[in-house]
Amino acid sequence: MADIQIKWSCCEDLSIRESALDCGFNLSTLNLSGLSKDRSKWIVDEVTKYILDAIESCWEDDNPRIKFGDVKNGIYVISFGGNMCIGYENGESQVLYIGQGKIKSRLKKHLRSWVMNFSESLQDMCLTFNMAKVVVRNSRTPHKEVESDFIEKFIEKFGEKPILNSIRGVSHNKYHKYTRASSRPLHKKQGVSYGWKMSPMPKNDWFRELKG
């Protein structure tokens, strides 16, 4: 058994709409799906870079000795910010996705895939990113083990995977013990009172679990 100590870096309440406006794009009047493929990709790439730079800045404030792009054994949790939550089978949570790997490149991939969907139906929603480097003694893949444990803990509590996780994590036979602080992003944020509960309709792309 290993006690997992995770030091989280958090970038809170990033708005895709506000980020796009800062880049010079008004998503309220801009139909990305109606633009040419090249122009749409350019806009998505610009907004993605802007958000990723903000996330990297938060990381470097908390981890001045660890370069964001160098983190390979990372764990991250993407959640709704503000007072919005998802209605899961056994309760409400703001968690959207639990992932692992090279945090910067993984988040870049997610954002490129999701900006289009968010811009069409959820552009006013804010996102919160919790990220950490994972080191466990005698383990070559601690980030994969932690991701698997977190997804299983989420399923145990809410009855299903986070809405954007299409698969469970990699199974393993190790037992890790987590403090509440180490698993903080899975818990309801202190002081937050949910004001809205969202559940996607069957015809919505978000209804079908998206592969991360």
Image (cartoon, rainbow, N blue to C red):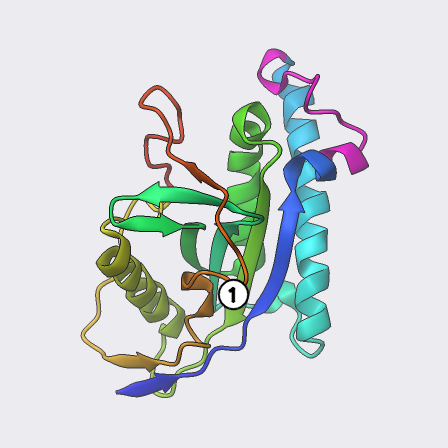
Horizontal side of residue 28 vs 101, given as left or right: right
Residue at screen point 42% across, 63% down: 187
Q: Quadrant of residue 172?
A: bottom left
Q: Quadrant of residue 124?
A: top right
Q: Is residue 79 above or below residue 130?
A: above
Q: Which residues are magenta?
A: 20-34
Residue at screen point 37% across, 34% down: 199
The reply to whether the magenta stretch includes residue 165 is: no
Secondary structure beneath dot 1 equals loop
Residue at screen point 35% across, 24% down: 201
Q: Which residue is mark 1?
A: 190
Horizontal side of residue 99 vs 14, given as left or right: left
Residue at screen point 68% across, 21% down: 28
In the rendered image, the quadrant that contains the N terminus is bottom left
In front: 5, or 189? 189
Q: Residue 41's spot in the image, x, y percent?
A: 63, 27
Q: Is residue 137 above or below residue 39?
A: below
Q: Amino acid under label 1?
A: Gln
Q: Residue 39's spot in the image, x, y percent?
A: 69, 21
- Magenta span: chief secondary structure: loop
Q: Is residue 39 visible?
A: yes
The reply to whether the magenta stretch includes residue 26 is: yes
In front: 188, or 111? 188
Q: Is residue 161 visible?
A: no
Q: Residue 178's spot in the image, x, y percent?
A: 35, 79
Q: Residue 195's spot in the image, x, y percent?
A: 50, 43
